[in-house]
Image: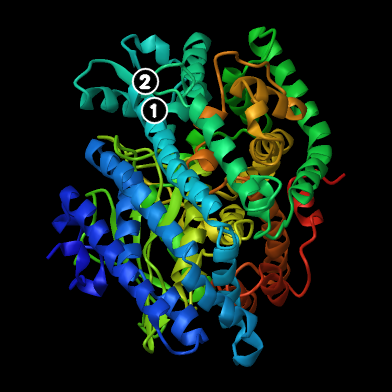
Amino acid sequence: MNILNKPFHTTYNTAPFSEIKNEDFLPAFKTAIEKARAEIDDIVINSDHPTFENTIEALEYSGEELDRISSIFFNLNSAETNDEIQKIAQEVSPLLSEFSNDITLNEDLFKRVKSVYDSKSEFKLNTEQKTLLDKKYKAFSRNGANLPEDKKEQLRAIDKELSQLKLKFGEHLLAETNKFEMHLTNESDLSGMPESAKEAAKQLAESKGKDGWLVTLDYPSYIPFMTYADNRVLREKLSKAFGSKGFHNDDLDNQNIVLRISQLRYDRAQLLGYKTHAHFVLEERMAETPEKVNAFLNELLEKAKPAAGEEFETLEEFAKDLDDIDQLQKWDSAYYSEKLKQKLFSLDDEQLKPYFKLENVIRGAFLVAEKLFGLRFEDIDTIDKYHEDVMAYKVIDAKDNLVSIFYADFFPRAGKRNGAWMTSYKPQMIKDGKNERPHVSIVCNFTKPTKSKPSLLTFNEVTTLFHEFGHALHGMLANTTYPSLSGTNVYWDFVELPSQILENWCYEEDTLKLFATHYETGEVIPMSLIEKIKASSTFHEGMQTLRQLSFGLLDMSWHAGESPETIKSVKLHETKAFGETSLYPDVPGNCMSTAFAHIFQGGYSSGYYSYKWAEVLDADAFEYFKEEGIFNKTVADKFKTYVLSQGGTEDPMTLYKKFRGQEPKPEALLRRAGLLK
């Protein structure tokens, strides 16, 4: 029997990565889909009157094996992919899409669900059960259950094509990232670069059998070059390569995919009776409507734009005085911002990096989790990992109970997409009286150790690690009955609260003293540097806010407007969407949309605004911690009880108010950002 179709007799039921072969996946998916179909059939043919237990609960626990295989496979496709896995993904995605449609478009199943939904007052349901019932009913009604047969077929065709296009978009993006290399053989071309970045570039060249230095579009390679390299011509070359991914009118071009995905999403929404894709998505969000989202984004834009304009003028003047730069371009942004930051605060990443050895930062995150939530992290070497770089931990509470298994994967490689994310290999749930604990993972792309130095993080990478660890805590501390309501299965504009709030601890002296020690001397980070970190935390906040808002507005422009069939040029549409937020001159050969994986590959379509939305929540929530003490147990317990452990069992604003005692106020964010005059 296929290893993926039977129980894993492993330590803590972890995935047996080393025993799974690529060729196992396709047959395993097919077997698991058939098993799940049989489970659905059992619900449908049950002659007993529909009840919450025999219909809603049975549906919730169906397809468990399929879900487990899917999580393993698609996580590998993001973090450790290859041509074979990508080919399987293209075969499997339509099968999963078709199966999903077979459930939501199954009239007999929907009748049973609707029967329970219509007579819910007869059942004595608790809050979580009511939420699950509502969610299951909407999963049908919002996905075509009430459509006539011909429209259902249209929906099936749309969903099948969408699943393939999203995969193709991501494959093109990864191939574009891997394809570009800037091979330098003259050391003067690396003038201005920190020694650690030069060493990493040399090591990268050596690994590819080349002399000299290699710079790529992977973040740990790209960002140091754009930030420090004095050679403006090479910065321009690298920036244009980064900004033109998927925009070359070749076989890796994403323009038609962007247009097609947008059109299909619009058609799907119309088919289901919604004005746009954004109207469909936002019905199940805290923000509720595109009008509210646009009002929110434009209100912040109004507050941030004057500050951003002033910051940009100051930066342009600075560049002109320093290097006689006439017009600031996008490839000058990080370089002169870093120079100005050094001048204003006498602070740069190279000063800070020795205090942020990766292993110490991980330990710091663990200590924060221990102080706040009583968690302890122990190395575990008795479980399988999918790559030798992956670290694995057993997470336990004060009574030595297992809380979670935690994987951490920190370094870039060819089979791994850019960026940072949190994911899960096994969900938390309570079934047959047993609390099944989750297996959670975070994936990042940090600078690898070199021959002479360990992995030393920039401060931005430190906050990234804490951000993803915040998501991980949301997954680890889940304590709900049903897996679809567990952990990070919450409204999309609520999911960033646990991640973004944890970043705040990185700026606090009491936190930094726990782990920020010099990797060579062991010296604790000096107070003077902590003060500079705090003082510089709002540096260019106006411009940063404008940048985030521009992404949110671009997302809404693709998903909340008229039919995308009126859009003839991806580039022209994007330029118009960026109109109010543009500071730098446009680069004709560059396009953001063709590489905007968050909305065209990931799950953020009509949801990119949620980063800023959650910032309002996290700033307001952290003010509560600051008032009572950043490690105050009472506040931490409330946050754990009402936010981290509850998942999506209740309306997020209800949960937030239980924790905070009030609705969030945007003033806390504006105060923190220095935008409140």
Image quadrant where residue 7 sits: bottom left
Q: Residue furthest left?
A: 1
Q: Is residue 167 above or below residue 218?
A: below
Task: Tell me the quarter of the image containing the C terminus.
Answer: top right
Residues marked 2 and 1 touching at CB (< 8 Å): yes
Is residue 126 shown left or right of residue 229?
Answer: right
Q: Is residue 20 above or below residue 299?
A: below
Judge by depth and name the residue closer to the eye, 598 or 114: 114
Categorize mark 1 by other alpha carbons within 10 Å: few (<14), some (14-19), many (20+). many
The amino acid type of the residue labelled 2 equals: Phe
Label 2 secondary element: loop
Is residue 134 shown left or right of residue 477?
Answer: right
| Residue 474 image position (x, y, % from top left) | 51, 66
> What residue is shown with label 2?
180
| Residue 65 image position (x, y, % from top left) | 30, 68
Q: Is residue 117 visible?
A: yes
Q: Residue furthest right?
A: 677
Label 1 secondary element: helix
Disc ID at residue 308 = none
> What residue is shown with label 1?
177
Q: Is residue 462 visible?
A: no
| Residue 173 image position (x, y, % from top left) | 42, 31
| Residue 523 image position (x, y, % from top left) | 44, 51
Is residue 306 shown left or right of residue 210?
Answer: right
Judge by depth and name the residue closer to the eye, 256 or 228: 256
Image quadrant where residue 81 sits: top left
Judge by depth and name the residue closer to the eye, 53 or 574: 53
Judge by depth and name the residue closer to the eye, 277 or 16: 277
Residue displayed at 17% across by 73% down: 9
Image quadrant where residue 441 sits: bottom left
The amino acid type of the residue labelled 1 equals: Thr
